[in-house]
Amino acid sequence: MRTLRHVPVPAQLVLVLALAAAGCGRAEEQGAVLPDPVGRWAVESLTTGGRTLHAPATARLDLGEKEAKGNYGCNGFTAAVSFAGTSAVTVTPGATTAMACADMEFETAFAKLFTGRLTIDRGPDRLTLKTADGSTIAMTSEPVVPDAPLTAVEWTVQSLISGGSVSSLPAGAAGAARFTIAADLSVSGTLGCNRFSAQVTRDGDRLTFGPLTTTRMACDGPAGEVEAKLTELFASGPLLSRIEGRLLTLTAADGKGLIAEAPSDAE
């Protein structure tokens, strides 16, 4: 009968094995809960200069491998990004729209923080970007504002696009242009002065508005100017549509377009 001898294990080896096992357990735990920075993030707040600024519901950041895009809360932006693993990212700002927005303090602070080298802190469903001076951009992977549906929602035109620029509607026309696309793709609303209706055809993310039937009130001033631009836009052919949160963007081939907003209860 063979006798198995007990071979003592050096204390140093025991310690190494124990640390390796603990490290493996932590790695598995972290792998289960810590997100990849690349993805879509909803911005919750900024901390800068000893203050906390709470984000508008539409503030977001989409981080790609080499490019980021997002919304400061009103204005859209792009940036080039370069990751150092999952611990840091270097941001080079790109293009941005230039609308006059209600919460310009938050917009300006967000733009100032989202540049240069930022360290990355990850938590369960959370991401925090930190600047060299300790200012932070706190985000969550849970979208604060789900994308609104295209149909059965009243869209209110907020701004007009012309090439690379975006301008808010002039005083006297804000909130006047609205439209709703029904499930059968019939559309009705107001151009800012006259009411209109039309039929829309859909090809993927492109919408083509058929001939507009409108009332015939004489319109002048800012409302008349907006109406003329919207009438021209809807008649210009296929419009590329994009919905991000509660914002709908329709853009023609020549770069002209509109940005409309759904009500806050749209789902």
Image (spheres, rainbow, N blue to C red):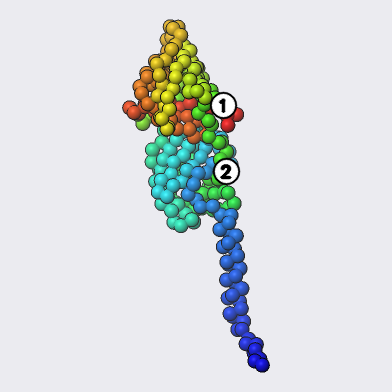
Quadrant including the N terminus:
bottom right
Q: Which residue ends up furthest to the bottom in the rendered image?
A: 1
On the question of residue 229 being in view, the answer is: no
Query: Which of these two is toward me, 28 or 156?
Result: 28
Q: Measured along the vertical axis of the image, is residue 202 above or below residue 91?
A: above
x then y, percent, for residue 177: 48, 18
In the structure shown, which secondary structural element does the residue marked by tag 2 occupy?
A: loop
Of the numbered discs 2 and 1, the one sitting upstream in the chain is: 2
Q: Indicate left or right for 163 with 216 as reference.
A: left
Report the amino acid beneath label 2. Answer: Glu
Quadrant including the C terminus:
top right
How would you rate the neighbour count of disc 1 (Cα within 10 Å): few for under 14, some for 14-19, many for 20 or more?
A: few
Q: Measured along the vertical axis of the image, is residue 141 above or below residue 182?
A: below
In the structure shown, which secondary structural element does the residue marked by tag 1 occupy?
A: loop
Q: Residue at x 47, y 43 (%)?
A: 62
Residue behind mark 2: 142
Q: Residue at x 60, y 65 (%)?
A: 25
On the question of residue 17 being in view, the answer is: yes
Residue behind mark 1: 263
Q: Measured along the vertical axis of the image, is residue 58 above or below residue 191?
A: below
x then y, percent, for residue 121: 54, 53
x then y, percent, for residue 258: 43, 25
